[in-house]
Amino acid sequence: MIRRIESENAPKPAGCYSQATRVGNFIFTAGQLPVDPTTGKALKGASPAEQTRRILKNIAALLEENGSSLEKVAKATVLIRDVTLWDEVNKAYSEFFTGPVPPARTVASGIDIHNGLDVEIDVIAEVGDS
């Protein structure tokens, strides 16, 4: 069974999609943009590092409110506008994944991200005890 997953501490969907879904013991997030969940405003003009941190804070809230955490992320997909931003994005990303088994990850660059933003991230995370 597929269930919708939501959090008040993550941006509300701007279209016909869920913040995340749960299938069995896994949560699949939608691609998350750097949006302040309180104001609903995108962090356009913020540095790629700041955008990455905001996204991962939003993802952490979504996971933690639904029985998971960043420590249980098995797979991440990172989209960046330009490959020259990679070092900055990667440094900020690594602040959130400090455990002994970082998630598997796919990175794609040269992406035209909505609202002229620099970064978008989605994850797949396990729910419950490992």
Image (cartoon, rainbow, N blue to C red):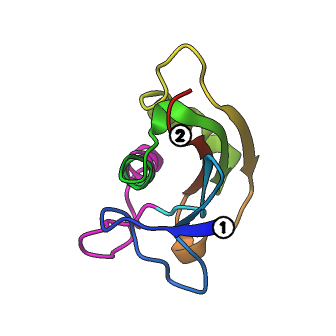
Name the mark on residue 89: 2
Q: Amino acid at mark 2?
A: Val
Q: Relative to 22, is 50 above or below? A: above
Left or right? Give the position of 37 relative to 69: left
Q: Secondary structure at mark 2?
A: helix
Please provide percent x and percent y for residue 12: 41, 76
Q: Residue beneath label 1, please?
A: 2
Along the line of sight, the residue nearer the viewer: 83 or 124 = 124
The residue sitting at the front extreme is: 1
Q: Position of residue 42 (x, y in %)?
A: 39, 70
The structure residue drawn at horizontal position 55% and vertical position 58%, both measured from the top left corner, is 118
The residue sitting at 50% across, 37% down in the picture is 128
Q: Say which element carries label 1.
A: strand
Q: Residue furthest bottom?
A: 16
Magenta extent: 34-56
Tell me if residue 53 is in the magenta stretch: yes
Q: Identify the amino acid type marked 1.
A: Ile
Residue at 56% across / 86% down in the picture? 15
Q: Nearer the viewer, residue 3 or 94?
A: 3
